[in-house]
């Protein structure tokens, strides 16, 4: 009895651990507030918005299709291979198992990059096909590793007996061996399917423009926080699978045993059984399938007239894309990236021809230097007149003749602090080294930003390449490490809103949003100066629809459109006409969104410093992080 | 017999094209510099103190996580394997089910649970219990690893356990073995193949992960996966990244060879 109880207790404990995060995500899908750090009340609106969000839905169906096809292919290839390997001599078996283990042992990123290099070398078009190949590749080992232990346990003599009794090898296999290994094959398929569903890194490197899986979609959203629609979708997926499982496993048969239902005639219960075990699951599957056709049809209407846009995650109001399509008849293929460093190899390798991309200042400089960008024909962009002169002037730091770029967003890097936790006035970066705030400081987790802040604090240029200055900065960062609660990029926002920390280093665009969610927060640009950055639209040299790209940029420079984007992403717009249209006085004159640049003399833009300096920075940063 | 070997054909073709050739590309990158000349500098990057430390911590954390997974998963698999067949498939699926919520989302959910003002601490505070402060520490990383990789340990062990012939266990009992002896001498040796699969499936992803340490370790603990990821993504230095991945692979192959050797020895006596 006690044993039974302990077993139940153990199972229950594991279940709680396994499902605690799931329940959390489900709860978040009903959260009125957009950030995960705050409960804003119960709502169903995310479910409604989910079905109107074509991007998420088509990503969802792409994921399902890829996972299913990849898992099925991997199961066939893998099971066949496992059977063959089982019958091999020791040496060959070791060889094959070695090969099998390679994808599992390789860091995912290595596999992703190596496949990408291969696809580029053979000039394969990145897209659905390349993702599928990559997924099958990493799925096969899971199938083999699930099937192999089963095969090890099957009794060879039974198979041989079947042969002796006159069965053909094929018959013997399907009648004798196969039933024994079915659980292994099934769990192999399930594992493969689940791994595909979950994979991010490899997909990221092998995908092309206009195709997204749920993982890559989620990852691009990490920068600005996960959209609640994603929580809603996950909840629906989860509940659907759960319901299917319950229906298939708990037929009314078991209920029949209970006394109340014994009286019932057998016939209706059979109908009920069929209804529950077959009809409903099939209906749900069919519904999903048709949904898939619906959304894939929606996304696949490919006009010959298109523009391929590659932008930061959550960096544009999706409605703007629809408006652009309606007004011009040009289809937008929209894709998102999360860091400049990920963007660069994609452009330099030329694997995908993007028409418009939105890198930051120093990356634009690097691209110009390496001859990757095309000169923009400003005759096609009359709306450039709406962009403030100051910002065009700022742009000259990375685009000296204003030939390649059109400013889209800009901002500063500064300190966000919580007024209830920090009582003193904040004016200097030195507060990031104040023992008082031990474990209450959030530092940026990127080389340039972390070093930029420290170099500025020390009074140096944030583009310093002087080794002594950099070493000094490194030592200061190491000194700071025990005080830091976490090194983060995107999560500063959620953590500050949730009162997790007192001080955080943050981009001004995020500061505006966090203040709306938590009025206790205040943003300041320290007196030692800081980084001022600009993200601009540029056109890569290998663009196939350059004119459409220019039309797109021109559209974004229209004041009403720029305003719409500003309201959606809260990053400062260089569009002066759009700023005039902002209705809320407090926002229009916000010191955070639109600081008076003449007041700050020591704001600097990041410069591209060459691979050697990049490497030095990287090494020093690693020393900080591993200290 | 020959026709049976042909079954490996598609797999061989697939592996050569999409595993081995890409791997050679990595090897090429690992041994060349930016200018395309031969160099060992990328491989020797692993000997810098910070990279050695990262490798050490990664090995330690993934070892602990694998061990914890094994300790948690084995009893679990045993309990599950004793259930009735129909119910079992249901229970097993319940264990895979969490994986259908995206991995990034699940790991982020742990943040919400573990944070200073998070769900768990709110509950503990309500019960007047001391707060749980493991977010941004190695413990949180281990928790994340165990949570994410536990099913990979449970499933292979479970798959092997349900195949064990009950008659073998009955025979052992008839011959006078007590439950502990039966487990140690019969059940466990028979389940070794599953355990080995499980260890591989947990240890390797744990050793190479970078997302879990980023999200739950607060970016304060640098794992070797983070170093590699950074050299590819932040520093855009594919040569160093390739060199480090090559070293990492050698480490994994070495540790797996060790495990496999153990497998053979035990397996031999078991049958």
Image (tube, grey):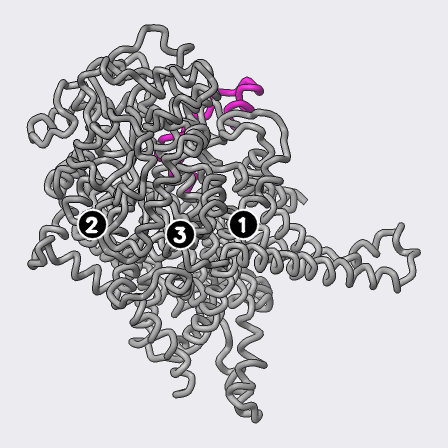
As rendered, which of A56 and A3 lies closer to the eye? Answer: A56
Q: CA distance from mark 2 to mark 1?
A: 34 Å
Q: Chain of mark 1?
A: A
Q: CA distance from mark 3 to mark 1?
A: 32 Å
Query: Which residue is disc 1 drawn over?
Result: A57
Q: Are marks 2 and 1 in contact (CB under 8 Å)?
A: no
Q: In the rendering, which numbered label is found on residue A372?
A: 2
Q: Which residues are magenta?
A: B120-144
Q: CA distance from mark 2 to mark 3?
A: 42 Å
**Crowding near the residue tagged with mark 1, few <14, some 14–19, many ≥20 C-alpha atoms within 10 Å:** many
Q: Is residue B41 left or right of residue A270?
A: left
Query: Which residue is disc 3 drawn over?
Result: B202
Q: Chain of mark 3?
A: B
Q: Residue at x 39, y 83 (%)?
A: B6
Q: Residue A454 at what x, y percent from top left? A: 19, 23
Quadrant holding the N terminus of chain B: bottom left
Circle nearer the viewer, 2 or 1:
2
Q: Are marks 2 and 3 in contact (CB under 8 Å)?
A: no
Q: Residue A579 at what x, y percent from top left? A: 39, 23
Q: Is residue A461 left or right of residue A504?
A: left
């Amino acid at each position: 009895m006690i044993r039974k109880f302990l077993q139940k207790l153990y199972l229950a404990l594991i279940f709680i651990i396994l499902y605690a995060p799931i329940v959390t995500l489900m709860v978040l899908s009903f959260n009125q507030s957009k950030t995960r750090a705050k409960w804003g009340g119960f709502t169903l609106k995310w479910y409604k918005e989910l079905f109107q969000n074509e991007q998420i839905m088509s990503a969802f169906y792409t994921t399902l299709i890829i996972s299913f096809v990849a898992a099925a292919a991997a199961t066939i290839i893998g099971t066949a291979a496992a059977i063959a390997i089982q019958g091999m001599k020791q040496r060959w078996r070791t060889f094959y198992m070695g090969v099998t283990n390679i994808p599992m042992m390789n860091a995912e990123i290595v596999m992703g990059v190596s496949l990408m290099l291969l696809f580029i070398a053979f000039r394969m078009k990145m897209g659905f096909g390349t993702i599928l190949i990559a997924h099958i590749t990493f799925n096969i080992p899971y199938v083999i590793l699930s099937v192999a232990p089963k095969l090890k346990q099957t009794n060879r003599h039974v198979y041989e007996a079947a042969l002796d009794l006159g069965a053909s090898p094929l018959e013997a296999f399907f009648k004798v061996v196969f039933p024994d290994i079915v659980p292994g094959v099934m769990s192999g398929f399930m594992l493969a399917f689940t791994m595909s569903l979950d994979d991010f890194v490899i997909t990221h490197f092998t995908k092309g423009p206009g195709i997204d899986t749920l993982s890559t979609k989620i990852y691009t959203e990490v920068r600005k926080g996960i959209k609640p629609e994603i929580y809603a979708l996950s909840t629906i997926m989860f509940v659907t699978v759960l319901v299917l499982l319950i229906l298939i496993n708990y037929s009314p048969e078991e209920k029949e045993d209970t006394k109340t239902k014994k009286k019932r005639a057998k016939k209706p219960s059979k109908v009920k059984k069929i209804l529950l075990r077959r009809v409903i699951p099939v209906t749900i599957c069919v519904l999903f399938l048709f949904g898939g056709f619906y959304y894939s049809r929606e996304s696949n209407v490919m006009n010959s007239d298109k523009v391929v846009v590659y932008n930061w995650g959550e960096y544009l109001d999706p409605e703007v894309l629809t408006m652009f399509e309606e007004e011009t008849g040009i289809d937008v293929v929209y894709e998102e990236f999360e860091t400049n460093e990920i963007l660069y190899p994609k452009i330099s390798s030329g694997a995908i021809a993007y028409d418009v991309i939105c890198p930051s200042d120093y990356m634009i400089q690097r691209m110009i230097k390496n001859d990757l960008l095309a000169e923009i024909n400003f005759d096609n962009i009359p709306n450039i007149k709406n962009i403030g002169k100051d910002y065009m002037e700022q742009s000259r730091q990375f685009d000296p003749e204003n030939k390649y770029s059109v400013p889209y967003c800009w901002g500063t890097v500064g300190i966000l602090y919580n007024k209830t936790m920090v009582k003193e006035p904040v004016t200097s970066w030195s507060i990031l080294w104040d023992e008082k705030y031990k474990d209450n400081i959030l530092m940026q987790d990127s080389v340039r930003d972390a070093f930029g802040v420290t170099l500025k604090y020390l009074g140096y240029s944030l583009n310093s390449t002087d080794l002594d200055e950099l070493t000094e900065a490194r030592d200061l960062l190491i000194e700071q490490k025990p005080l830091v609660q976490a090194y983060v990029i995107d999560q500063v926002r959620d953590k500050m809103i949730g009162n997790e920390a007192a001080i955080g280093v943050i981009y001004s665009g995020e500061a505006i949003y966090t203040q709306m969610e938590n009025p206790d927060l205040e943003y300041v640009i320290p007196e030692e100066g800081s980084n001022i950055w600009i993200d601009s639209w540029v056109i890569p040299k290998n663009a196939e629809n350059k004119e459409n790209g220019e039309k797109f940029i021109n559209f974004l420079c229209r004041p009403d459109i720029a305003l719409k984007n500003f309201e959606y992403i809260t990053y400062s717009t260089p569009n002066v006409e759009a700023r005039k249209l902002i209705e809320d006085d407090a926002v229009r004159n916000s010191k955070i969104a639109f600081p008076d640049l003449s007041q700050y003399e020591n704001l600097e833009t990041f410069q591209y410093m060459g691979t050697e300096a990049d490497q030095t920075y990287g090494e020093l940063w690693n020393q900080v992080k591993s200290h | 017999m020959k026709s049976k070997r042909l079954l490996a054909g598609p797999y061989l073709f697939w592996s050569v094209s999409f595993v081995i050739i890409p791997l050679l590309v990595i090897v090429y990158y690992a041994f060349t510099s930016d200018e395309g000349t031969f160099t060992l500098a990328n491989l020797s990057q692993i000997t810098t103190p910070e990279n050695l430390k990262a490798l050490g911590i990664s090995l330690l954390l993934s070892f602990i996580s694998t061990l914890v997974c094994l300790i948690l998963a084995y009893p679990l698999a045993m309990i599950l394997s004793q259930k009735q067949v129909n119910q079992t498939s249901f229970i097993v699926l319940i264990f895979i089910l969490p994986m259908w919520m995206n991995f990034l989302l699940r790991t982020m959910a742990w943040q919400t649970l573990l944070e200073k003002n998070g769900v768990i601490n709110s509950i503990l505070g309500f019960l007047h219990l001391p707060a749980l402060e493991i977010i941004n520490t190695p413990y949180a990383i281990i928790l994340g690893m165990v949570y994410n990789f536990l099913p990979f340990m449970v499933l292979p062990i479970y798959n092997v356990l349900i195949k064990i012939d009950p008659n073998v266990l009955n025979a052992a009992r008839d011959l006078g073995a007590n439950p502990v002896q039966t487990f140690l001498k019969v059940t466990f040796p028979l389940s070794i193949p599953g355990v080995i699969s499980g260890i591989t499936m947990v240890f390797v992803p744990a050793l190479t992960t970078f997302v879990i340490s980023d999200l739950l370790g607060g970016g304060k603990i640098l794992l070797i996966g983070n170093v590699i990821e950074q050299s590819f993504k932040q520093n855009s230095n594919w040569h160093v990244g390739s060199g480090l991945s090559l070293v990492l692979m050698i480490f994994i192959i070495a540790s797996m060879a060790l495990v496999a050797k153990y497998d053979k020895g035990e397996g031999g006596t078991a049958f």
